Image (tube, helix red, strand yellow):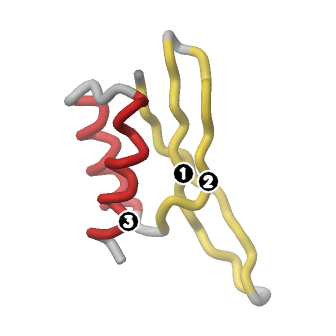
Amino acid sequence: MKYQIFKHNITIENKIIETYGINIYENKVLIDKLYDISTDYKALSHLVDSLNKDRIALIHFDSILEDFYLDNV
């Protein structure tokens, strides 16, 4: 697995908000794209770096993402 951050914008109450998501690749093929995970690039970058460094399997991704949300609320 390879995890990568991507940036996009959403509009809420006529305000444009920059938010970040994660692309998930397997054998260089995009298999999933998760939008609006965080507006905190630094925190999400740290998570993605850890996912890639530790070679986290997709089966564990949901629980790790849940922990990320709990730690960054």
Residue 69, picture quadrant? bottom left
Residue 42 appears in the rendering: no
Provide residue 24's location: percent of width, then percent of height.
51, 31
Give the amino acid at mark 1.
Gly
At numbered mark 2, what does the secondary structure look like: helix, strand or loop? Answer: strand
Q: Nearer the viewer, residue 31 or 40?
A: 31
1 or 3: tag closer to the N-terminus:
1
Q: Pointers 1 and 2 in contact (CB under 8 A)?
A: yes
Alpha-carbon span between mark 1 and mark 2: 4 Å
At numbered mark 3, what does the secondary structure look like: helix, strand or loop? Answer: helix
In the image, is 11 to the left or to the right of 31?
right
Provide residue 22's location: percent of width, then percent of height.
51, 44
Alpha-carbon span between mark 2 and mark 3: 14 Å
What residue lies at 58% left-to-right and 61% top-to-bottom? Answer: 36
Provide residue 43's location: percent of width, then percent of height.
31, 61
Q: Nearer the viewer, residue 72 or 20?
A: 72
Q: Nearer the viewer, residue 63 or 27?
A: 63
Residue beneath disc 1: 21
At numbered mark 1, what does the secondary structure look like: helix, strand or loop? Answer: strand
What residue lies at 53% left-to-right and 57% top-to-bottom? Answer: 20
Give the amino acid at mark 3.
Tyr
In the image, is 56 to the left or to the right of 29?
left
Give the amino acid at mark 2.
Tyr
Q: Nearer the viewer, mark 2 or mark 3?
A: 3
